[in-house]
Image: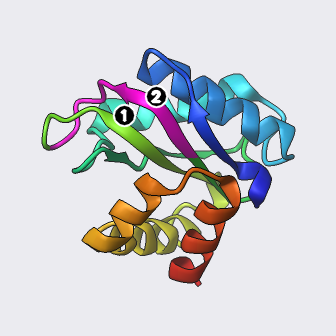
Amino acid sequence: MLSNIMVEVTGESQADIFQAIGKIAVENGYSKDQRAVVEGLQQREVESTTGMMDGFAIPHAQSSAIIAPAIVILSLAKGIEWQSLDGQPITFVVSLLIPEGEAGTTHLQLLSKVARMLMKEELKQQLKADTTTQAIFEVITQHLN
């Protein structure tokens, strides 16, 4: 899972971040089609924003191109526009990649766990302050398990 986490990710737009997520998905064996992963993320974003509050976004995709479920976490070098619920730039991304066949089960369980986790103010501040993949990994696994 450490290879699913990146810090100081640079990007100028949501599209750049989706490309980074797609690249990680392919590199780590969750998909063989980066373009399909990116399109899945974009399609979901059209339905409604995944930009939450306080600089966090939870983009997610369900696709037949996704082989295994995954969580990809990106801490961004600078905030980017995401049409978030509070209008603030996004600096931390928790992306869920779900195989099409698991859309109703794995997807909803993971989304619920991540949303509950991000309701905790202290935890959000800790994630934003962590600067290493190991530190982020430890916080996420502690709260998602």
Q: Is residue 69 above or below residue 24?
A: below
Q: Residue furthest left?
A: 86
- Report x, y in % for residue 61: 53, 44
- Location of the C terminus by quadrant is bottom right
Q: CA distance from mark 1 to mark 2?
A: 5 Å
Where residue 51 sits, quadrant-wise, is top left
- Report x, y in % for residue 125: 34, 61
| Secondary element at image label 2 | helix
- Report x, y in % for residue 129: 44, 55
Q: 109 or 126, which is in the foreground? A: 126
Instruction: Residue type at mark 2: give it.
Output: Gln
Q: 141 or 35, which is in the foreground? A: 141
Pointer 2: what residue? Answer: 42
Q: Is residue 8 above or below residue 13?
A: below
Q: 130 or 84, which is in the foreground? A: 130
Q: Are marks 1 and 2 in contact (CB under 8 Å)?
A: yes
Q: Which residues are magenta?
A: 74-85
Q: Residue at x 33, y 43 (%)?
A: 50
Q: Residue furthest top?
A: 12
Q: Residue at x 51, y 19 (%)?
A: 11
Q: Residue at x 22, y 30 (%)?
A: 83
Pointer 1: what residue? Answer: 45
The local crowd at label 1, few if under 14, some if 14 to 19, many if 20 or more residues have their Cα within 10 Å, is some
Q: How many marks?
A: 2
Q: Residue at x 63, y 36 (%)?
A: 21
Q: Is residue 117 left or right of residue 96?
A: left
